[in-house]
Image (spheres, rainbow, N blue to C red):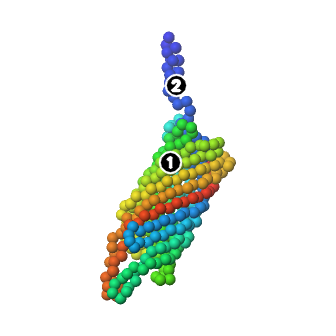
Amino acid sequence: MRLHLARLSAILALGIMPATAHAASLEVQNAESTVYFDTGFMHQQYHENISPGDDESGSTPGFGIGFSVLRSTNPRNLGAIDLYALLDYHLNGGNINYSGHTQIFNGYNFDYAPLSATDHAIFQNVEARIGAGFPLVGGGESIPFLSLGYQSWSRDVTSDEVGPSSELYHEGAFGGGWKFDLPVGKTLVASATGQILALAGGGISAGSSTLGTFGVSPEEKLELGLDDAITPRWHVFAKANLTHYTYPGTSPQFYYADGYEFYEYEPTSTTTQFGLNVGVGYSF
């Protein structure tokens, strides 16, 4: 009787143990554990929330490099949580259209005059992520993560009316997001990522001078991707992303020129960016 009870206990114990390994599916793990390089373009729409205001729009080519990893936290693949990490750098640069205004002195005061120019712009974005992956039915993976980064816009506007004007918009970014990976074929993995970030510690500078500091403002990101393993190690991928954020503006900066007191400030603005990149990665 004791022998039968021992056997029954063993059977029940096996019944409540995981029948399969709870870890990232091989397709997802290979797609997420890569060193990669990509290239593509980004289209920017910038609008100042003031009248008269400035608008800038245009597309710039660029490239990105980085690596990501997704690994089980249990060497024997019996744990239900995977470890996720990413480090990414992207740069875009080129000419975009500036449509705005400049101030002219009419002998009594300053008026606004329309101004069209070219911005020789450079955009940079650095992001680091750390998170956890949870396997889904069908071999997919749910990955909540925290992120920390830095982004900048080197704004170099040149026109015949006012000459060159260079400014650097910069801010830190921190927040979190959620990524979903789903195998949709023997070698193909589809992904969707959403992020909510806070931009903080930013401002505008020209050379070594600070023209103003920004407060905290929100940023939202959405990315859709496809990764195809052309060999067990080499992958090709495509990603489309949409980013929306605001600059909250700066306090007025007062200065004197020719016996007059002037002030300038950065108004609040809205920026929308759309990017499309294709690349190659090596799985490890």
Q: How many marks?
A: 2
Residue closer to the observer: 2 or 112: 112
- The residue at 50%/61% (across/down) is 273
Secondary structure type for disc 2: helix
Residue 94 placement (x, y as % from top left)? 56, 70
Toward the viewer: 60 or 23?
60
State the image coordinates of residue 91 (x, y, percent, origin top left). Answer: 54, 64
What percent of the width, then of the height, locates residue 61? 58, 65
| SS type, badge 1 | strand
**25 shown above or below 157:** above
Image: 27 above or below 101: above
Q: Kindly identify which residue carries mark 2.
A: 15
Residue 75, by quadrant, is top right
Q: Residue farthest to the right?
A: 231
User: What x and y, as percent, mark residue 177?
Assistant: 46, 50
Q: In the image, is residue 266 above or below residue 190? A: below
Q: Amino acid at mark 2?
A: Gly
Residue picked out by circle 1: 179
